[in-house]
Image (cartoon, coloured by chain):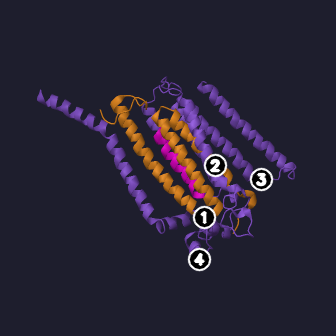
């Protein structure tokens, strides 16, 4: 019940990649001012988490990794739909979406 | 740094990585004893990892949000290929279909709704040193996560008995060349006592190889989604339904306004 060692990727390296991608996503969230790019950075972070799930699924040779990543994917889709709708609503009212100027929940 | 220059720099780095991979591949083909660590799959993983990091950096660094979105699409494709290398087939295809297909198209639509060219984004921060602070914070977080995840690799786990090797620490297995054998898997999941859960675990965990006997991973995952994971699955569908309703309600505003405008106009016409 083993897979070919030549095609096995030790999950330590995959985890390193996931950590780096997650950190880049954090930089994007903290540095950018365009809310859409901030959302894309959040997507990147979710993808890094998916990568970690799948790395462990690969190492342990189980399907649970893919199942959890599937749920992360579904939650990400829902989050994007709502988030982009909120951004659209804000833009429609204020004609701008700079995160520094949009600091009130109602006005 | 202009957008053009960073784009050139990043794509040049990607090209360099590709050339390095090809050179290594050829070298490993001619003198395999000199490069024992290099297998095509592992080398491809390294190349894809570098490309994924580069495209993620491009997503953060490029100023034009459309360029950012396209860099993120590239990133999703590289990650999908990495998933394929790891035999995680279903998620590789879902990654392309859902992320690169559906979600990014949504992003591009919204970007084109209110893309204002010439509006400064990066570096025009009202907060002083925001870029530096953000990068430092992320680096600190990365360092902390690495320490937490990899510290156990050098430590002997307490629940090992005297005869066993240090290598059977679950963290040391992160960098080992082989998939985790059954025994260690059970040790790592139930530290502190001897595993007697073998029967139940085999029941609830179908290994990837066993999935082949059931007609493929997708089928096996589907069966488990509708049996063992039925409640989370249904909750997810409720969540998506709520998201759809919320998105429609949020987006309805303008349509309602247009309808009101039409109605008042018709009222004016009929009033005359």
Q: Position of residue B85 (x, y in %)?
A: 67, 54
Q: Position of residue A51 (x, y in %)?
A: 59, 51
Q: Nearer the viewer, mark 3 or mark 1?
A: 1
For residue B160, which quarter of the picture?
bottom right
Residue for point 60% across, 46% down: B144
**Residue B199 tag number:** 4
Question: Which element carries disc 3, helix, strand or loop?
Answer: loop
Q: Which residues are magenta?
A: B89-107
1 and 2 marks on the same chain: no
Q: Nearer the viewer, mark 3 or mark 4?
A: 4
Calculate the distance from the C-alpha at mark 2 to the C-alpha at mark 4. 35 Å
- B24 displayed left or right of B51: right
Circle nearer the viewer, 4 or 1: 4
Q: Is the residue B225 above or below the residue B137 in the image? A: below
Residue assigned mark 3:
B39
Tell me the CA gap for discs 1 and 2.
26 Å
Other residues around mark 4 within 10 Å, as few (<14) / some (14–19) / many (≥20)? few
């Amino acid at each position: 019940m083993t897979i070919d060692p030549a095609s096995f990727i030790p999950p330590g390296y995959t985890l390193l990649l996931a950590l780096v991608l997650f950190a880049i996503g954090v930089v994007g969230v903290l540095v950018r001012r365009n809310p859409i790019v901030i959302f894309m950075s959040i997507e990147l972070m979710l993808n890094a988490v998916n990568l970690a799930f799948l790395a462990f699924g690969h190492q342990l040779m189980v399907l649970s990794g893919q199942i959890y990543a599937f749920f992360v994917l579904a939650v990400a889709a829902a989050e994007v739909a709502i988030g982009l709708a909120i951004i659209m609503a804000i833009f429609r009212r204020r004609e701008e979406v700079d995160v520094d100027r949009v600091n009130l929940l109602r006005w | 740094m202009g957008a053009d220059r960073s784009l050139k720099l990043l794509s040049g780095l990607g090209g360099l990585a590709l050339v390095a991979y090809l050179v290594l591949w050829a070298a490993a083909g001619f003198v395999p004893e000199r490069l024992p660590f290099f297998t095509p799959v592992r080398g491809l993983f390294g190349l894809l990892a570098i490309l994924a990091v580069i495209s993620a950096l491009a997503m953060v660094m490029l100023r034009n949000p459309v360029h950012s979105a396209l860099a993120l699409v590239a990133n999703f494709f590289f990650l999908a290929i990495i998933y394929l290398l790891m035999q995680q087939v279903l998620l590789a295809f879902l990654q392309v279909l859902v992320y690169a297909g559906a979600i990014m198209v949504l992003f591009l639509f919204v970007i084109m709704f209110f893309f204002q060219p010439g509006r400064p984004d990066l570096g025009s921060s009202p907060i002083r040193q925001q870029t530096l602070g953000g990068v430092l914070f992320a680096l600190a977080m990365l360092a902390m996560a690495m320490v937490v995840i990899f510290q156990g690799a050098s430590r002997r786990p307490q629940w090992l008995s005297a005869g066993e090797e240090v290598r059977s620490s679950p963290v040391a297995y992160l960098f080992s060349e082989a998939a985790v054998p059954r025994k260690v898997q059970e040790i790592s999941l139930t530290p502190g006592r001897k595993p007697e859960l073998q029967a139940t675990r085999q029941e609830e965990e179908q290994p990837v190889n066993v999935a082949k006997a059931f007609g493929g991973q997708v089928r096996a995952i589907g069966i488990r989604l509708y049996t063992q994971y039925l409640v989370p699955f249904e909750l997810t569908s409720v969540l998506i339904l709520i998201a759809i309703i919320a998105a429609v309600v949020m987006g309805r505003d303008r349509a309602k306004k247009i309808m009101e405008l039409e109605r008042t106009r018709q009222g004016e016409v009929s009033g005359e």
